[in-house]
Amino acid sequence: MSRLPLIQPDTATGKAADLLAGVQKALGVTPNMTKAMVNSPAVLEAYLGFSGALGGGALSAPIRERIALLVAEENGCDYCLSAHSYIGANIAKLSADEIQAGRHGESADAKAAAVLTFATAVVRTRGGVEESDIKTAQAAGLTDGEITEVIANVALNVFTNYLNKAVDTDIDWPLVRHHEH
C-alpha cells in the first residue's frame, strides 16, 4: 500500500485536478505514480514538463524507454520496471528480447547499444563519468546533444525510481520484478 495518499482525479481540486485531467487526457489513464506526485502539484508539473521536453528531443521513444528500463533495473524500482516494460512493448514497440536486453544495458541496435553503454556509466557512477566514457559515446556516433539528453533521461528516471520506491507506489501495470544484483 502506498505510503502517501494516491490523489484520485474525481476528488482532486484546483491545480491538482487540472494536472491529473491533463494526464488522463494525454495517456488515457492516470497512473498511480502521477496520483502520488500530485500530493505536491509542483512535483507533478515539474515531472510533466521535464518528461515532455525530453519527449521532443533527439532521442527516440524506443531509446528513451530502454534508458528507463536500464535505470529502473539498476535502482531496483519495480514500479518503473513494470510501467516501462508495458510502455516499451505496447507504445515504443520494443520486442521482449529488447526489453530484457535494455534492462541490462544491451541492445541489438547499434545506436541504442551506444546510448545504453553511456547511460550505464552515468547511472553507475551517479554522474561521475570519465572523459573516456564521453569519448566512447562520441566515437559511437552520439552527438553532444544526444549525450546531454542521455544524462537528462537518466536523471529523470532516477527521480521517478526514487519517488516510487520511497512512496512504495501501488503498481498499476503488469508486474515486473527487478533482478537481484
Image: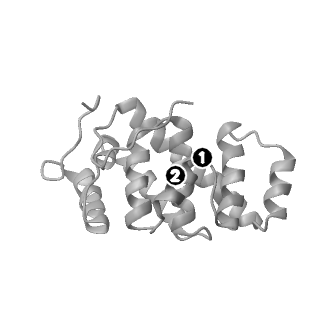
- The residue nearer to you, when weighing 31 against 91, is 91
Residue 104 is marked as: 1
Q: Are marks 1 and 2 in contact (CB under 8 Å)?
A: yes
Indicate the amino acid at tag 1.
Answer: His
Residue at disc 2, secondary structure: helix
Residue drawn 31% across the image and 67% down it = 26
Across and down, in percent, residue 105 comes to 63, 50
In this view, which residue lies farthest toward the left? 10
**Does any portion of residue 156 appear in the rendered image?**
no
User: Could you tell me which quadrant the N terminus lies in?
Assistant: top left
Tell me which corner region of the image, top left, top right, bottom left or bottom right, holds residue 166.
Answer: top left
Across and down, in percent, residue 131 comes to 86, 48
Across and down, in percent, residue 47 comes to 44, 52
Tell me which corner region of the image, top left, top right, bottom left or bottom right, holds residue 5.
Answer: top left
Tell me which corner region of the image, top left, top right, bottom left or bottom right, holds residue 141.
Answer: bottom right
**Does any portion of residue 96 appear in the rendered image?**
yes
Indicate the amino acid at tag 2.
Answer: Gln
Residue at disc 1, secondary structure: loop
Residue drawn 28% across the image and 38% down it = 170
- The residue nearer to you, when weighing 67 against 153, is 67
Across and down, in percent, residue 34 comes to 32, 49
Residue drawn 45% across the image and 67% down it = 92
Q: How dense is the environment of label 2, judged by Cα within 10 Å: few (below 14), some, or many (20 and up)?
A: some
Name above or below for residue 90 compared with residue 121: below
Q: In the shown orientation, is residue 84 left or right of residue 108?
A: left
Q: How dense is the environment of label 1, judged by Cα within 10 Å: few (below 14), some, or many (20 and up)?
A: many
Q: Disc 2 marks which residue?
A: 100
Q: In the shown orientation, is residue 61 left or right of residue 174?
A: right
- The residue nearer to you, when weighing 101 against 124, is 101
- The residue nearer to you, when weighing 101 against 65, is 101
